[in-house]
Amino acid sequence: MNLLENKNVIITGGSRGIGKAIAEKFAQNGANVAFTCIKMSENSFALAKNLENFGVKAKAYESDASDFESALNLAENVLNDFGSIDVLVNNAGITKDNLLLRMSEEDFNDVMKVNMNSVFNNTKAVLRQMLKQKNGSIINLSSVVGLKGNAGQSNYSSSKAAIIGFTKSIALELGSRNIRCNAIAPGFIETEMTRSLQQDQINEWAESIPLKRSGKAEDVANTSLFLASDMSSYITGQVMNVCGGMLT
């Protein structure tokens, strides 16, 4: 069953990790996929080609999600190339972890700019088209640490908490126009970013999770598919925790 057949989607930071998993899941379900990367690479072109094997249109765009003009240009280019923008997944993000005592102002501001400003930038960029269509689904990637905090991640936690507030406000503003906005809060998900961790560290994390395992990028992708599809047509302004029960 193609849950996203003929829908055109934008995924920021879609060339690796969770973003890549979402792109693949959406393409498998019939969506045409526009995904961004901060710099074009062979991997970007390869992913676009792989997505096209599912019989959909796919294209990689070089775009800085944290830059407002870049986000506007992206939306315009995608609209010209695809004809509509039905789903936006704000996935782009970075970490620059440190204890507050050692954290620089630059590291705090950089994380806020990439993680939070990018959500504003790209949502604002697609807004006119979604209002014109009177339809759309916006999915923002937050984190469980945006709900519970985490030592050494005051910048990251702040940015992810801000995303939740933004999500709920936009859901209230746009609900009457049939535009939904929801957030996903992943827990400990194994991606390229976690491969530097030692296995005993991963096992220790897993033991603290009720399901006794770390999550996969596909777990987040499955939730994104649900929120992008008409199966969630009566869901907006919500935060869906994909954390194996970590916050229970």
Image (cartoon, helix red, strand yellow):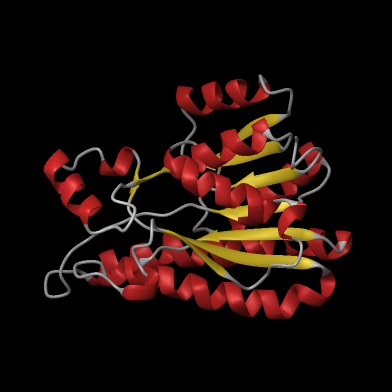
Residue 18: give x, y in percent of width and height: 46, 44
Q: Quadrant of the C terminus?
A: bottom left
Residue at 21 percent of width and 53 percent of height: 207
Is 145 displayed left or right of 139 in the figure? left
Q: Is residue 206 left or right of residue 60?
A: left
Quarter occupied by the N terminus:
top right
Place of residue 146 in the rendered image (x, y in percent of width and height, measured from the top left) = 38, 71
Write the residue at 34% across / 68% down: 145
Residue 234 in view (yes/no): yes
- Quarter of the image for residue 96 reads bottom left
**In terms of depth relative to the viewer, which is nearer, 13 or 205?**
205
Q: Quadrant of residue 77?
A: top right
At x 50% / y 37%, what residue is drawn? 20
Residue 118 percent coordinates (x, y):
52, 61
The answer to whether residue 182 is left or right of residue 102 is right
| Relative to 16, residue 120 above or below | below
Q: Position of residue 190 (x, y in %)?
A: 33, 43
Residue at horizontal 46%, vertical 75%?
162
Question: On the picture, is 113 further left or further right than 123?
Answer: left
- The front one of 99 and 189 is 189
Say how many tags the image has: 0
Say which of 73 and 184 sits in front.
184
**Residue 38 visible:** no
